[in-house]
Image (cartoon, rainbow, N blue to C red):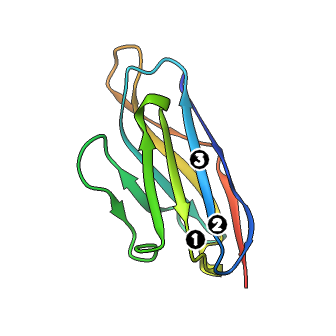
Amino acid sequence: QVQLVESGGGLVQAGGSLRLSCAASGIIFSINSMAWYRQAPGKQRELVANIPSGGSTYYADSVKGRFTISRDNAKNSVYLQMNSLKPEDTAVYYCYAAVRSRGTGYRDFWGQGTQVTVSS
């Protein structure tokens, strides 16, 4: 089985920075897309940033210029550097990966979520 484990969330003042990390473990043949989603109270889960195995990254308009997604394929990891944080960035952040394991097709896997709270 594949597991995604996130770290790096916490409480920060507006204007501050946080860096989220997510590492995939288990039997992994390859990872296609990796991404970060977030869900604020009372709202639907939304895509924050996506980084495919090849090609361009994607950012939600609300985070462009402030957040940077990156990945380390050797470590099966994805990161989210969040700068100039705003109170509206407060949410639970989830790591996502499309993983091929045991020779099957790609399957979706999610982390457990990490809380990010930005105080004004």
Q: Quadrant of the C terminus?
A: bottom right
Per the image, label 3 sits on a secondary structure element best described as strand
Q: Could you give the CA–CA distance between mark 2 and mark 3, rounded to whole angstroms?
A: 16 Å
- Name the outermost residue toward the top: 102
Q: Is residue 10 left or right of residue 50?
A: right
Residue under circle 3? 21
What residue is drawn where x is 44% and y is 29%?
74
Q: Name the residue beneath numbered marker 2.
A: 91
For the residue pair 101 and 77, the one nearer the viewer reads as 77
Q: Residues within 10 Å of mark 2 (few under 14, many from 20)?
A: many
**61 lies above or below 36:** below
Residue 43: give x, y in percent of width and height.
58, 71
The numbered disc on residue 23 is none
Residue type highlighted by circle 2: Ala
The numbered mark, 3 or 1, whose residue comes first in the sequence reads: 3
Q: Considering only order in the chain, which callout, 2 or 1, is on the residue closer to the N terminus?
A: 1
Across and down, in percent, residue 39 comes to: 58, 63
Q: Is residue 119 left or right of residue 112?
A: right
> Which residue is disc 1 drawn over?
43
Secondary structure beneath label 1? loop
Seen at 25% across and 43% down, the residue is: 54
Q: Nearer the viewer, mark 1 or mark 2?
A: 2
Query: Label 3: few (<14), some or many (≥20) within 10 Å?
Result: many
Q: Earlier in the sequence, mark 2 or mark 3?
A: 3
Whole-angstrom CA distance, mark 1 to mark 2, is 10 Å
Nearest to viewer (mark 2 / mark 3): 3
